[in-house]
Image (cartoon, helix red, strand yellow):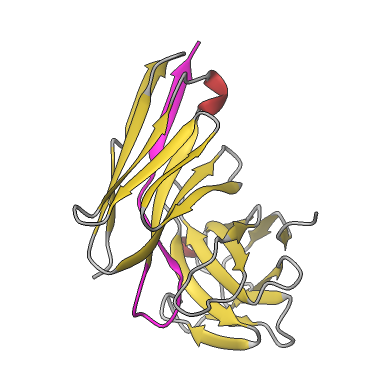
Protein backbone atom coordinates (compact mmCIF):
# COMPACT_ATOMS: atom_id res chain seq x y z
CA UNK A 1 0.00 0.00 0.00
CA UNK A 2 1.30 3.47 -0.86
CA UNK A 3 1.91 5.36 2.36
CA UNK A 4 3.32 8.73 3.29
CA UNK A 5 4.03 9.58 6.93
CA UNK A 6 4.90 13.03 8.24
CA UNK A 7 6.29 14.30 11.50
CA UNK A 8 5.72 16.23 13.59
CA UNK A 9 1.96 16.74 13.26
CA UNK A 10 2.18 20.10 15.03
CA UNK A 11 5.13 22.41 15.47
CA UNK A 12 5.29 25.77 17.23
CA UNK A 13 8.51 27.76 17.07
CA UNK A 14 9.81 31.26 17.62
CA UNK A 15 10.56 33.63 14.78
CA UNK A 16 14.07 33.07 13.43
CA UNK A 17 14.30 29.40 14.36
CA UNK A 18 15.43 26.75 11.88
CA UNK A 19 12.53 24.43 11.09
CA UNK A 20 12.65 20.81 9.92
CA UNK A 21 9.65 18.76 8.84
CA UNK A 22 10.16 15.10 8.04
CA UNK A 23 8.46 12.75 5.60
CA UNK A 24 8.91 9.02 5.10
CA UNK A 25 7.26 6.91 2.45
CA UNK A 26 6.80 3.36 1.29
CA UNK A 27 8.63 1.91 -1.70
CA UNK A 28 7.95 2.79 -5.30
CA UNK A 29 7.90 6.55 -5.21
CA UNK A 30 8.82 8.30 -8.46
CA UNK A 31 8.62 11.87 -7.18
CA UNK A 32 7.76 13.70 -4.01
CA UNK A 33 5.99 17.01 -3.55
CA UNK A 34 6.17 19.46 -0.70
CA UNK A 35 3.02 21.58 -0.58
CA UNK A 36 1.95 24.54 1.54
CA UNK A 37 -1.66 25.08 2.56
CA UNK A 38 -2.86 28.27 4.21
CA UNK A 39 -6.14 28.65 6.12
CA UNK A 40 -8.90 28.85 3.55
CA UNK A 41 -7.63 25.81 1.70
CA UNK A 42 -5.42 27.06 -1.12
CA UNK A 43 -2.54 24.68 -1.84
CA UNK A 44 0.72 25.85 -3.34
CA UNK A 45 3.37 23.50 -4.61
CA UNK A 46 6.74 24.36 -3.06
CA UNK A 47 8.93 21.64 -4.52
CA UNK A 48 8.78 18.51 -6.57
CA UNK A 49 11.87 16.34 -6.32
CA UNK A 50 13.00 12.84 -7.10
CA UNK A 51 16.60 13.05 -5.93
CA UNK A 52 19.04 15.31 -4.13
CA UNK A 53 18.20 18.74 -2.88
CA UNK A 54 16.34 21.84 -4.03
CA UNK A 55 16.42 25.36 -2.60
CA UNK A 56 14.10 28.29 -3.07
CA UNK A 57 14.68 31.34 -0.93
CA UNK A 58 14.57 30.26 2.72
CA UNK A 59 13.14 26.85 1.87
CA UNK A 60 15.23 23.75 1.29
CA UNK A 61 13.95 20.27 0.41
CA UNK A 62 16.03 17.11 0.43
CA UNK A 63 15.27 13.53 -0.43
CA UNK A 64 17.18 10.33 0.32
CA UNK A 65 15.94 7.60 -1.97
CA UNK A 66 17.76 4.78 -0.17
CA UNK A 67 16.28 5.72 3.19
CA UNK A 68 12.86 6.63 1.70
CA UNK A 69 12.94 9.92 3.53
CA UNK A 70 12.55 13.59 2.69
CA UNK A 71 12.90 16.74 4.75
CA UNK A 72 11.68 20.29 4.34
CA UNK A 73 13.74 22.96 6.07
CA UNK A 74 12.87 26.59 6.67
CA UNK A 75 15.70 28.92 7.61
CA UNK A 76 15.15 32.18 9.54
CA UNK A 77 11.48 31.32 10.03
CA UNK A 78 8.91 34.11 10.00
CA UNK A 79 5.29 34.30 11.18
CA UNK A 80 4.13 34.38 7.55
CA UNK A 81 5.55 30.84 7.23
CA UNK A 82 2.73 29.66 9.49
CA UNK A 83 0.74 27.15 7.46
CA UNK A 84 0.16 23.44 7.01
CA UNK A 85 2.99 21.75 5.13
CA UNK A 86 2.09 18.56 3.30
CA UNK A 87 4.34 15.92 1.84
CA UNK A 88 2.85 13.97 -1.07
CA UNK A 89 4.23 11.17 -3.16
CA UNK A 90 3.75 10.05 -6.72
CA UNK A 91 4.05 6.28 -6.78
CA UNK A 92 5.39 4.69 -9.94
CA UNK A 93 3.82 1.72 -11.64
CA UNK A 94 0.26 2.60 -10.80
CA UNK A 95 -0.72 3.90 -14.22
CA UNK A 96 -1.71 7.33 -12.92
CA UNK A 97 0.15 9.94 -11.00
CA UNK A 98 -2.40 10.95 -8.44
CA UNK A 99 -0.72 12.08 -5.27
CA UNK A 100 -0.75 10.17 -1.99
CA UNK A 101 -0.67 12.75 0.78
CA UNK A 102 0.69 12.78 4.30
CA UNK A 103 -1.56 14.19 7.00
CA UNK A 104 0.33 17.48 7.09
CA UNK A 105 2.38 19.38 9.65
CA UNK A 106 0.69 22.39 11.22
CA UNK A 107 3.44 24.97 11.70
CA UNK A 108 3.00 28.10 13.83
CA UNK A 109 5.79 30.65 13.99
CA UNK A 110 5.36 33.06 16.87
CA UNK A 111 6.78 36.60 16.70
CA UNK B 1 -1.17 33.90 -15.95
CA UNK B 2 -4.42 32.13 -15.13
CA UNK B 3 -4.16 29.29 -12.67
CA UNK B 4 -6.60 26.51 -11.90
CA UNK B 5 -10.02 27.86 -11.01
CA UNK B 6 -12.89 26.14 -9.28
CA UNK B 7 -16.51 27.06 -8.79
CA UNK B 8 -18.40 27.50 -6.66
CA UNK B 9 -15.95 28.27 -3.85
CA UNK B 10 -18.56 27.37 -1.25
CA UNK B 11 -21.62 25.17 -1.54
CA UNK B 12 -24.20 24.31 1.08
CA UNK B 13 -26.49 21.45 0.17
CA UNK B 14 -29.29 19.75 2.00
CA UNK B 15 -28.86 16.04 2.50
CA UNK B 16 -30.15 14.22 -0.56
CA UNK B 17 -29.51 17.04 -3.02
CA UNK B 18 -27.30 16.62 -6.07
CA UNK B 19 -24.32 18.96 -6.51
CA UNK B 20 -21.96 19.74 -9.38
CA UNK B 21 -18.49 21.16 -8.83
CA UNK B 22 -16.54 22.69 -11.69
CA UNK B 23 -12.82 22.82 -12.38
CA UNK B 24 -11.09 24.91 -15.06
CA UNK B 25 -7.53 23.64 -15.42
CA UNK B 26 -4.58 25.61 -16.71
CA UNK B 27 -4.86 25.90 -20.48
CA UNK B 28 -2.96 23.11 -22.21
CA UNK B 29 -2.63 20.91 -19.15
CA UNK B 30 -3.42 17.37 -20.16
CA UNK B 31 -3.76 15.80 -16.73
CA UNK B 32 -6.49 16.71 -14.25
CA UNK B 33 -6.97 15.36 -10.74
CA UNK B 34 -9.74 15.58 -8.18
CA UNK B 35 -8.98 15.26 -4.45
CA UNK B 36 -11.17 15.28 -1.36
CA UNK B 37 -9.95 16.87 1.86
CA UNK B 38 -11.94 16.26 5.04
CA UNK B 39 -11.56 18.73 7.89
CA UNK B 40 -8.19 18.38 9.58
CA UNK B 41 -7.00 15.70 7.18
CA UNK B 42 -4.68 15.59 4.20
CA UNK B 43 -6.25 15.44 0.74
CA UNK B 44 -7.13 12.06 -0.73
CA UNK B 45 -7.11 11.11 -4.38
CA UNK B 46 -10.49 10.69 -6.06
CA UNK B 47 -9.96 10.44 -9.80
CA UNK B 48 -7.64 11.30 -12.68
CA UNK B 49 -8.15 12.32 -16.31
CA UNK B 50 -5.72 12.41 -19.17
CA UNK B 51 -7.44 14.62 -21.72
CA UNK B 52 -11.04 13.39 -21.81
CA UNK B 53 -10.19 9.87 -20.68
CA UNK B 54 -10.82 8.99 -17.06
CA UNK B 55 -7.86 6.71 -16.43
CA UNK B 56 -8.29 6.14 -12.72
CA UNK B 57 -11.40 6.47 -10.59
CA UNK B 58 -10.28 4.17 -7.82
CA UNK B 59 -10.57 6.88 -5.17
CA UNK B 60 -14.24 7.70 -5.72
CA UNK B 61 -15.89 6.71 -2.43
CA UNK B 62 -19.18 5.48 -3.86
CA UNK B 63 -21.24 5.27 -7.02
CA UNK B 64 -22.86 8.55 -6.00
CA UNK B 65 -19.69 10.27 -7.17
CA UNK B 66 -19.23 10.84 -10.88
CA UNK B 67 -16.66 12.92 -12.76
CA UNK B 68 -16.41 13.90 -16.39
CA UNK B 69 -14.18 15.93 -18.68
CA UNK B 70 -15.93 15.60 -22.04
CA UNK B 71 -13.73 17.90 -24.13
CA UNK B 72 -10.48 17.35 -22.28
CA UNK B 73 -10.53 20.74 -20.60
CA UNK B 74 -13.16 21.71 -18.00
CA UNK B 75 -14.10 18.96 -15.58
CA UNK B 76 -17.18 18.50 -13.42
CA UNK B 77 -17.42 16.41 -10.27
CA UNK B 78 -21.00 15.45 -9.52
CA UNK B 79 -22.25 14.06 -6.24
CA UNK B 80 -25.72 12.59 -6.21
CA UNK B 81 -27.92 12.30 -3.12
CA UNK B 82 -25.38 14.06 -0.92
CA UNK B 83 -24.74 12.74 2.58
CA UNK B 84 -23.24 14.51 5.58
CA UNK B 85 -20.03 12.51 5.23
CA UNK B 86 -19.54 14.16 1.81
CA UNK B 87 -18.80 17.46 3.56
CA UNK B 88 -15.23 18.33 2.63
CA UNK B 89 -13.10 20.57 0.46
CA UNK B 90 -12.89 19.25 -3.08
CA UNK B 91 -9.61 20.17 -4.74
CA UNK B 92 -8.80 20.08 -8.41
CA UNK B 93 -5.25 20.03 -9.78
CA UNK B 94 -3.81 19.99 -13.27
CA UNK B 95 -0.42 19.22 -14.75
CA UNK B 96 1.31 18.70 -18.04
CA UNK B 97 1.16 15.18 -19.33
CA UNK B 98 3.09 12.27 -17.98
CA UNK B 99 5.81 11.57 -20.52
CA UNK B 100 8.42 8.85 -20.49
CA UNK B 101 7.91 8.17 -16.80
CA UNK B 102 8.54 11.78 -15.82
CA UNK B 103 5.94 13.31 -13.57
CA UNK B 104 5.16 16.99 -13.78
CA UNK B 105 4.29 19.40 -11.00
CA UNK B 106 0.62 19.65 -10.11
CA UNK B 107 -1.06 23.05 -9.78
CA UNK B 108 -3.98 23.26 -7.40
CA UNK B 109 -7.19 25.23 -7.54
CA UNK B 110 -8.56 27.01 -4.46
CA UNK B 111 -11.03 24.22 -3.77
CA UNK B 112 -14.78 24.04 -3.27
CA UNK B 113 -15.90 23.74 0.34
CA UNK B 114 -19.02 21.57 0.39
CA UNK B 115 -21.18 21.50 3.50
CA UNK B 116 -24.05 19.04 3.60
CA UNK B 117 -26.66 19.85 6.23
**B9 or B54, nearer to the observer:** B54
**A90 or B35, nearer to the observer:** A90
Name which residue lies at 58% across and 47% down: A44
User: Do we see residue B41 in this rendering?
Assistant: no
Pick the quarter of the image with the C terminus of chain B. Answer: bottom right
| Residue B111, x across and y down, in percent | 63, 55
| Residue B90, x across and y down, in percent | 57, 61
The quarter of the picture where residue B6 lies is bottom right
**B46 or A49, nearer to the observer:** A49
The magenta stretch spans residue A92:
yes
The magenta stretch spans residue A8:
no
Q: Is residue A49 above or below residue B100?
A: above
Name which residue lies at 23% across and 62% down: A26
The stretch in magenta equals A91-111
Q: Is residue A109 above or below residue B49?
A: above
| Residue A35, x across and y down, in percent | 49, 47
Name which residue lies at 20% across and 56% down: A66
Q: Is residue B113 above or below residue B103?
A: above
| Residue A45, x across and y down, in percent | 55, 49
Pick the quarter of the image with the N terminus of chain B. Answer: bottom right
The quarter of the picture where residue A54 lies is top left
Q: Residue furthest right?
A: B1
Q: Residue furthest front?
A: A52
Q: Is residue A63 above or below residue B32?
A: above
Is B19 situated left or right of A96 in this image?
right
Amino acid sequence: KNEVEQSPQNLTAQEGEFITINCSYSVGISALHWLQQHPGGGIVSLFMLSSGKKKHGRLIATINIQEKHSSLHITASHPRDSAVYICAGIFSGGGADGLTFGKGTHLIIQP
Amino acid sequence: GAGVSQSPRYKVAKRGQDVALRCDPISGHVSLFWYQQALGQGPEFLTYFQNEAQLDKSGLPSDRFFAERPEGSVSTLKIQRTQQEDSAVYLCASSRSLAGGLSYEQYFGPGTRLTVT
